[in-house]
Image: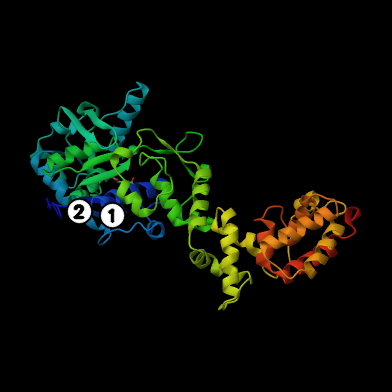
Amino acid sequence: MTGRLSEKIPVMRFAPSPTGYLHLGGARTALFNYLLARKLGGRFLLRVEDTDRRRSTPEAVGAILDGLSWLGIEWDGEIVFQSRGLERHLMAAHALLEKGAAYRCFCTPERLEKQTELARLHKKPYIYDRTCLALDPAAAAERAAAGEPHVLRFRIPPGETAFRDGVHGEVRFDNKELEDFVILRSDGTPTYQLAVVADDIYMGITHIIRGDDHISNTPKQLLLYRALEAEAPEFAHVPLILGPDKKRLSKRHGATGLVEYREQGFLSQAVFNFLALLGWSPGEDREILERRELVNLFSLGGINKRNAVFDQTKLLWMNGQYLSRMAAGEVLDLVKEEFLAAGLIAENSAPPEKDYLLRVLDLVRQRCRLTSDLLPRSRYFFPVELEYDQAAVDKHWKPGAAGLLSALADELQKTTDWSENSLEELLRTLAEKLHVSAGKLIHPLRVALTGMDVSPGIFEVMALMGRDLVLDRLGAALERFEGIRGN
Ligand code: GLU
């Protein structure tokens, strides 16, 4: 068997089967391996398990690489494609056969199906009955040489297989419950169990973090390591991710591929942070943890033994946190194309336009959770025709609103001080003079300026918008809503 690539440093891997997009569960597995490898100063390798030629597509490989790159999960060295490792898989299979750790099985699929059916009738789990284990190896080799179809099965030794799982502690399997599983199919292709072990040995993998759904594979794989006289890695099986209904997370829960999260306006830093906390906790209350802190804090000890529950609201909240903490320039880089396409800004906006745009983004992002919220919530800061939210108009454009806003427009025309504080003072003084509450002015004013009934503080909005746009917007709203409902 090919030896380990390195004996010294921890070597971890992510080994996705490219049969679809990179989903949250896969991304979390990748992330946990990545975090531990980086923390321990080890290597993090990527192996694409593309042996299922019918289901593995180049698009799916692309989607996985794309998702990992977006999250900033960088792998070391060249990607290992499992489909190119056939030679080492066959070498391992033949080494096992030669040692008597594997044997040829000529049982036909029909016979096995019949037995499976019989076991089902008796409500017993089916385990291969080892008929072919009794064959004389030399006679079996002759039948094989004569072209008789057969598979190679691994011979499960008697006893017990135990290991210390990094999450679950001591795990034991009675070998009686394990079947003499197939390692090489009749068409000569290796099965998952064989390929994964041969590849992990070849790549020198020392630690494996993977989903709980693999825990029943681990005793089989440990027995393969032993038979191949190779040192087994340490395993840690991470509990599954469930939807809020406590069923295994799937598309039904709105959990889509990683790339779709990007399209929906999620930030990769936020998703990275969120995934790290999906089943792991640093043991303190903080939830916003940057990449470097996560690397420093990550440990198997912090992985929860219970299944993690996916909480979309928390993800949105976290995204909002990251959005409000980023430098305004970075936010601009994220949305620039979108703002250009919407005609809100021009290609090479010079200062003061650029400065204005940065200030707008800085203000509105405090209330946004997704980057895709930024444009609709910034639009009214630009001299484009406003779309009014009808519900906001119905709610806040009460009888008398037009008269109040006309009076306000007159005052605004006259003032020379356009600062946030003095605008507020101006409005409150006018309200007092007119014997109305300030809200009677503020609510229709907000609708007139923004078209909506929520916005950042209205005086901040006015100060930033500037006199011309504010007066234009007021004029347009008065023209449009004048005369309705007794104004
Ligand atoms: N390719 C397997 C999967 O995507 C993972 C193999 C492993 O981690 O051992 O589930």
Residue drawn where x is 49% and y is 49% of the image: 318
Coordinates of residue 28 in the picture (x, y in percent): 38, 47
From the viewer's perspective, tell me whether residue 347 is left or right of residue 187. right
Residue 377: x and y, percent?
64, 59
Image coordinates of residue 251 in percent, x first then y, are: 50, 45
According to the picture, the residue beneath numbered tag 1 turns out to be 47
- The answer to whether the beta carbon of the residue marked 2 is less than 8 Å from any atom of ligand 1 is no
Q: Which mark is residue 167?
A: none
Q: Which residue is mark 2?
A: 203
Colouring rule applied to residues: rainbow
Residue kind at label 2, given as amino acid type:
Met
Percent position of residue 344, x then y: 63, 70
Q: Are marks 1 and 2 in contact (CB under 8 Å)?
A: yes
Quadrant of the image occupied by residue 239: top left
Residue at the top extreme of this rendering: 122
Instruction: Please name the residue shown 47% across and 56% down the image.
Output: 267
Q: CA distance from mark 1 to mark 2?
A: 9 Å
Any part of residue 417 in sight = yes
Q: Is residue 472 above or below residue 390?
A: below
SS at circle 2? loop
Q: Is residue 145 left or right of residue 329?
A: left
Where residue 400 sits, quadrant-wise, is bottom right
Front in this rendered view, residue 71 or 431:
431
Q: Amino acid at mark 1?
A: Arg
Q: Residue 16: in sight, yes or no?
A: no
What secondary structure is found at the residue carrying circle 1?
A: strand
Quarter that holds the C terminus: bottom right
Residue at 14% in and 42% down:
143
Within 10 angstroms of label 2, few (less than 14), some, or many (20 or more) residues? many
Would you say 147 lies left or right of 336 here?
A: left
Foreground pick, 277 / 90? 277
